[in-house]
Structure formats: C-alpha cells, structure tokens
Amino acid sequence: MKLVSLTIAGFRGFNDEQTLDFDGDLIIYAGPNGAGKTSIGESLEWLLYGKTLKRTKGDEISKREYAESYRNAHYGASKKPFVQAEVLDGSGVRRVVRRELQDDETSILTLDGKRIVALDELGLQTIYDRPLILQHTLQDFIFMRPKTRYEVLSAMLGLDSLISFRNAVEQAKNDLSKRLPPRIVEAQRRSTTLLQEFTNRPLLSPVALTIKQGKLTEAKKHLNRVALGAVPPGTKEADLERSLQASKAAKQRAQLDWGRFSLNPIPLPQSLPAISNMRVLERLLSDFHGQVEQAIEAAAEVPESVPDPQLREFASLGLQLQRDEADPHCPFCLADTLTPARVAELRKIADYVPATRPSLATAEGSLRELQGTIQRHREQLLALTPTFPSEQELGTIRELADAAPRQTGSYVTSSENLRNELDAVRTQREILAEAVRTTLNALTRGNVPPPGGTNLADALREYSDRVSNLPGAANAYAATYASLDPYVRSKLSSAEEVQFLDLLARGLDGWDDIELAHQAEAMAEILQDMIRQTRQFIETKQKQILGVRDKDIRAWYDLLNPGAPVGYDGIVPGTDSLELRARSFVKTIMAAPNLSASQLNCIGLAVYLACATRGASPHQLIFFDDPVQSMDDEHVEAFKKDLIKNLLDRGFQVVLLTHMDNFADDIEKLYRGKARTTLFKLEEYALVGPTVTWKGPEIGNILQRVRKNKDAIAEGFRKQAVQELRQFVERFVKDLYTAETGNSVSKRFEDKNWNELKTLIRQCKSFDAKDEPRLEDTHGFTSKFLHTDGSMPSKIPSSAQINPHYADMDALLGEYKGKFGL
Amino acid sequence: MNAQERQLIEELKSKLEGKIPRLLVDAYLAEEGPEGIISCAVKMLEGMAKGKEHETR
C-alpha cells in the first residue's frame, strides 16, 4: 500500500479540511516545530489503526494530556472530524480509506465508501508491521525507562493488546479483594479463624496445612477422621455433625471442678488449732471468773453511802460464784451468780467501792480477748470445712458416679452430716459470741439484759461440745470423698475437651466457608497464573517475531553504522523485559546505558524498519517523522544517502517529516533526479491548521521569491530580494556539487564567501568555467549590500540594479535545469 | 481493540488451561480493561456461594 493523498478535517492540529499531496516515491514535508507535522503522522496512524500510540502509551501525565484530543478544538461542533487517504493497494489500484470520528471517540471506517471493521482488504491483517516511525515513538525508544521501552517495543511488535490485557488482569487481581461479595468476605473471615484454631491443635494442624496447600478433599477427609475419633464408635459420617454436638453437650455436662470438694483427713484432731484452741477459750473464761471473784471480794464491805437498799443487801449477802462442788443446799450456790444481770449489779457497786475497779478492768480485758479468740476460732474451723457441692453439682456427681451408688450415697450422707455439724457449731458460736457481748455490755455499761439469755459458761460448754464432734464428721466426709473420687474422676471432662469438640463441630459446619474462601483465593491465583501465562505468551511471540527480524534489525543498524566496533548486538526477550544488547569490540554489554543517544536512535530506527519492511508486510510505505533527531552528522549522512536509497531501491514509498530545512533540502537534492521526489514546506501553524506554502526544489523557489520582491517600492522587500539572490548563488553551487558528487555539502560551507564556494564549483565537471564569473558577479553584487561594517554602501539597491542579476541567474538556472533534475 | 488484536487475545485464550481463565478472557473481550474481568470473577464467586447455600438447604 502506498499513499497518494491525505485529507484531514477537524483532527488534531487540522481545523479546515486540507488535502496533502503524497503522490511520489519520496515525499518530504519540512516545517518548524509546531507547524503541524506530528498531526499529519498521527492522522495517518489513527486512520490505519483507530488509535494513536501517543494516546495509549506513555505515562499517566502524557495520557491525560492527550485524552479526548483527537478532535480539533476549533472544528465546527456539528461536523464530524475525519481523515481520508487515497492509496494505491498492492495491485496498484486506487482506493479510498476514510475514518470518521464519532462523539464517543469511536470511529467509523470505510473503504471505497463501504463500511468495514478492519483494513484486511488492503492486507493490514497483522499489527506487526506498522509503517509509521513517528517522532514520539522514536523519542520513547531512546529516552524511555526500560519497562516503558519493553511496552513500546512490544507494541511495535504488535503485542500491545497483550500488554494491555496483562495489565488489566494485574489490575483485576489487585482490585478483586476490594470487590468481593459480603458473603465471601464473611467466609474468608470465618475460614481464617478456623484455620488459625486448626493450626493451634496438634491433631488438626495437618488439616490446616492441607487446606493451605489447596488440597481441600484431603483436608476434609482428615477432619472427618479426627471427628469420628471424638464421637461414639460406629457413628456414620452423615451423622457426624449431630453426633459431635451430642458429645459436646455430654462433655459440657461432665465438666465439674471435683477437686474443689476435697477435704484432707485429720489423723490427729488434737493437733488442729481449731481443737487445741478450745482450751484457750476455756482458760480465758476461767480468768474472767477469777477476776470477777476478786471484784466481789473487794465489794463485800459495802459502805453506808450506797443509797439503794437492795444493792446494799446484794453486796452484804455476798456474791459467790456458783461452783460445781458447792453445797447444793446453799441458796447462792444453786443460782448462776455470773449472769449478766449480776455482773451489771457488781458494776454499779464499783461506783461506791473503788477497790473493785482493777479486777473489773482485768475481767473486761479477759472478755474482750475471749471475744477476739472466738472470732479467730471461726477461721481456724475452715480447716475442717470443705466446699460443698450444690444440688446441681450433686446431680452431676451422681451422674458421673452412676457406677458407684453406694459410695455416692455415703458421700452425700457424710456431706449432709458435716454440713449439719458445721451449722450447729456456727449456731453455738453465735450464741457464745452473743453471751460474751451481753456480759461485756453489763460489765462496761451496767446494762441489764432481759432475762432468758445463755450464760457464758453454758454457751462455751455447748460450743466446745459441738466443736469436738467436727473432726469425726470431717474425717467421715474425707473418707467418702476418697472412695468416690476414682469413679467421678474417670468420667470428668475438661473445658479443653469441650472446646475441641466445639472446634470439630464448627469446622464441619463451616466447611462451606473454607471452600468459599479457598475459591476466592483460587480466583486470585487463577488471575496470577493468567498473568504468568500471558507473559510467557508475549515472550514466545516476541521470540517468534524477533527470531525472524533480528537479522533485518542488524542489517538496518549496520547500514547506518557500517563496520562500527561498538553497537547493536541483539534483543533478548523476557517475560517482563526486552533487553537491548550491544557489543563493545568483543564484549557484550547492555545497550541502553552504554550506547550513545545517536546509536540508540539508530537501533530504534533499525527495529522499526525491520518490522515495517518485513517480507510479508502489506505496506510499501515508510513514514518517518523526525527520524534523525538524536543522530550525529555521520549517522545522518548514512540515513540520507544509504537508508533512504535502500528503501527506494526496494520499492518503498518514503514519506519524511522534518523540522530541519537543510536536512530536507539535502535529501530532496540527493534524490531529485533519481526518484519522484517532492519537497513541501509547512509554514507556521494558523487557526485553520497547518499551511503548505510551496513545493518543489528550493533552488527554483528562491528565484520565484526574488521575482516577487525585486520590483517592490518598499526597500525591505528589495533587500529581501537581494538576500535571496545571494542564497540562489550559494544553493546553485551546493546543489550542483551534490548532483555531481552525490555528497551533501558540509556545514562548513554555509554562509561562506565566494572564494570558498569556488572550491566546490570547480569540482563539478558539468559546470562550464565560463559561467563562473556570472555567479561571482552576482554574489559580489549582493554581498556588498548585506554587510553593515561601514565599508560598503548601506543604500538598498534599486530594481534597475537588481534586475540584470536576476535575469542572468534565471537564464543560468535554465541552462543547468537538466543538471539539477528539474 | 481491532480485529488483529482481538485475534491475538483469542490465540492466548486458546492456550490458557481451564474453563475459568477462558471465561475471564471472554469477559475482557466484551469489556476491555480490568472491570470486565473483575465483574466476571465476582459473579463466578457469587454463583459458587449460592451453590453452597443451595447445598446446605
């Protein structure tokens, strides 16, 4: 396919509809930056592929910058932007391809007016052979980061759709976890908890491990085996969950802190503080008796000052404490003389008989000590007091020890006995404590208690009797506990066992959660595997393509770098990289960091050209946009002389866009007579779009401009004509030299005086020496008006002065037209 | 995506093992970008969850 013309309207930099001429073998569009060259390249790219790499590749900033920028901002809102090309197909038949931009940035493609989806009919069945070597793609190649270069290279190899697919899968994998349905998220949470709990149990940790390995069937079997071992033998798998729940309930019921009810036997009761301290209580009571007796003796001499006759009588009759050995006929001995009421009376006598006070004070101390000792004795009795099971706990004990009803009965009986004895002791202690308190009140405050209370001696005796029964009851309890212990202990279950059964039950119940969580994980793994397989696929494709193209890449590179000891050595494909290798003499090195920008420019061109010129390519067109932007002079020369020649010789149509006028002129000159070559100039960009100002060889155009300006009244235009006349002479010399030798003129000859230009013209055999003075004369005429050092006239020449030179140069050009290929 | 690019993705699809990856590729071809793949994956997982509920009932 070759390009004949390109019509662009409302697309990128083009506003008004314009048709650009591409009919020829070598078409050059030269213009300054911003004149619209890139828009021409992108228009053709969009026409052929429906998108541009500039939009789809590059970093985010670049993508944002170019987003929604196909449509020219000034283009009429009601009109549809379009790009249309007249092309010659492989058979040389003229076809019209048109793509129209829609509002949603999709496009409608037609071929000869018929709507189509792709340009298969023109042979564009593969995307591996882009004929477009555009400015940004080459720039990318030279300056991009390795990852981006990989993407661009892949795109260039036609694999960008795979890269996009891989990126989409990577993005999907990263985002999937945030988009999971709540049911799956909940399943993941539960599954994580279960797996953690499985891991913490030695019996179930293999289950957790197998789940993590993704072997769910095996894991479930293992879990079932463990669960079957925890339920009654013979349980079927179908009944497993129900049976586990039943076992768990039974174990829950069998949970009992049996050891809490134990009581140590008491082999030597007398050694217990609770028993031995009874004597302390008795001694304290005895001390109290003695001290009261002393007080009574001191109070026998009652003074007359006692006003109460009854009190005097009480004292005079004497107060004798009851004693067991006393005469039963004695009226005092029959009475309990140590009642609180009598103690209260004694306290009143003390008001009149001071001698009683020391004894009474000591007696009060004994009572208070007795009070404290009783309190402490309560604590000492705890050694004989077990924790008794509640009614519910007794029920559990009966259930657990159902094989030993006799022992259970004995235990229950002894338990009741001991509990009763302890209750009785507590009751008696309270009576004793009350008696002490009442007596103390009588002694210290003279309070006379109501009749009917228990006296201290009786209370202590009763208390002592009850306490003495306790060791026997406690030993009986301890013995029955010990006889029952083996039966109960064998049936006890721990909280740990219940938790284990609970975990098994939850594990079986929550198996769906484990499977769902696994499936979510598996989905992420599938995506990961798709990424891996896509990478491999890309690598394979790259190898296929590069395997075929590598020879071509080297050939193109060598064409630009003949015999260079340092340079391109190959491309090594990888799943995520395309490494450019270079050789430095005999050493293989990485190209990107080691080669110059000029060499990288050459590699980029070589790679693109190898793809675009492959044997099966439907394109007979190579479209360059600023192809030598980073090249040094030597490589630029090779591009101009060798690379373009090679392409033209192979029948390719070459389109070149460049901002370098000299570069464009040189190429135009080189190929003017050898191929159908046209040079177009683009002026500065205007609202309507790029402006093509003129076409054809510069040498012809220069004289046209001289003719336009030479007769102007305004001096500025005439000065312009003089300048252009001088440019004509210089270009005449240079173009003839190039046409004669095939070499472009070195930059050292630019803006030089006649003597230096003369060395060039004298090398041209086709130049008639008699014409040399004509050129010299015009060059001399113009030079003196173009210097402002004061030695030359500053006046602008008149039309009459310019015209003879113009006429002579026009005639000269006519004489040499054939030499220039015009 | 043009016909050639689609053809390349189809070629990759034919090389992928398993039904799910192929369905995910189809989802991508129906809607370019990650969204189609995610929606398809989520639908499949939802289907699996519903299947479990059905089994449980």
Image (spheres, coloured by chain):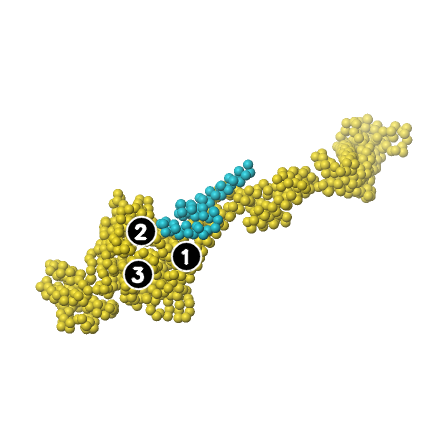
Chain colours: A yellow, B cyan
The residue indicated by pointer 1 is A541
Amino acid at circle 1: Lys
Q: Indicate the secondary structure of the residue bearing disc 1.
A: helix
User: Is residue A623 in view?
Assistant: no
- Residue A263: quarter of image: top right
Seen at 41% across and 51% down, the residue is B9
- Locate residue A37, reporting x and y percent: 27, 56
How many residues crowd around disc 1 within 10 Å: few (fewer than 14), some, or many (20 or more)?
Answer: some
Are labels 3 and 2 assigned to the same chain?
A: yes
Q: Marks 2 and 1, Cα distance to the nearest angstrom?
A: 25 Å
- Locate residue A773, reporting x and y percent: 13, 71
The disc at residue A121 is 2
Amino acid at circle 3: Pro
Q: Chain of mark 1?
A: A
Left/right of residue B3 with respect to residue B42 in the rendered view: left
The residue indicated by pointer 3 is A627
